[in-house]
């Protein structure tokens, strides 16, 4: 479910006829990094789950509402609009039109893999 602690600003259409992504604010503060997020974001067990727009698609991530640190938990996906968190999995719609769903197990990347992935994305 969405939460009143989450707000969206500056929602812009991503591509012609594409979804609207905006600046996510958690308790009035923006997560670290310059990312746009696809509504909705979900609070679950003290963390915020969101789909961030990246070059070539979307990545599902976990945001700590206290530190505003963002951690990616998915590979780059063509589309990912979050629906729910169920049984340790993120349930998301995987197409902009239609209601096709996919699931992703909630397993944050290990620190070594996270730093390697960040270095590869900078290239």
Image (cartoon, rainbow, N blue to C red):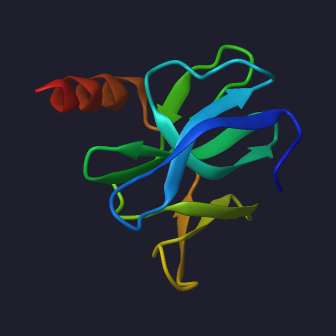
Identity of the residue furthest to the left in this view: 123
Task: Determine the image quadrant of residue 105.
Answer: bottom right
Q: Position of residue 65 (x, y in %)?
A: 73, 24
Quick one: 73 or 49, which is closer to the camera? Answer: 49
Q: Is residue 108 left or right of residue 39?
A: left
Please provide percent x and percent y for residue 119: 20, 23
Answer with left or right where residue 84 lies relative to residue 103.
Answer: right
Q: Can residue 90 be seen in this view?
A: no
Residue 86 occupies which quadrant of the picture?
A: bottom right
The residue closer to the viewer here, 50 or 104, is 50
* Image point (59%, 23%), residue name: 31
Is 108 rendered above or below residue 100? Answer: above
Question: Is residue 16 visible in this depiction of the protein?
Answer: yes
Query: Residue at coordinates 28% horizontally, 26% vertically from top-left?
Result: 118
Residue located at (75% from left, 36% from top)? 7
Q: Where is residue 10 in the image (x, y as percent from the top left)?
A: 58, 36
Q: Position of residue 9 (x, y in %)?
A: 64, 34
Depicted 7 relative to depicted 2: above or below: above
Q: Taking 31 as reference, is 35 left or right? A: left
Question: Does 61 sit left or right of 28 as displayed?
Answer: left
**Vertical arrangement, residue 42 with respect to residue 62, above or below:** below
The residue lying at 50 percent from left, 32 percent from top is 71
């Amino acid at each position: 479910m969405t939460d009143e602690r989450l707000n969206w600003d500056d929602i812009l259409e991503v591509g012609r006829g594409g979804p609207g992504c905006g600046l996510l604010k958690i308790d009035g503060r923006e997560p670290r990094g310059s990312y746009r997020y696809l509504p909705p974001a979900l609070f679950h067990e003290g963390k915020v789950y969101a789909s961030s727009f990246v070059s070539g698609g979307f990545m599902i991530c976990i945001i700590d509402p206290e530190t505003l640190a963002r951690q990616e938990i998915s590979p780059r996906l063509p589309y990912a609009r979050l629906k729910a968190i169920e049984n340790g999995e993120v349930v998301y719609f995987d197409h902009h039109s239609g209601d096709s769903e996919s699931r992703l197990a909630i397993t944050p990347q290990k620190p070594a893999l996270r730093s390697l992935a960040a270095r590869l994305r900078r290239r």
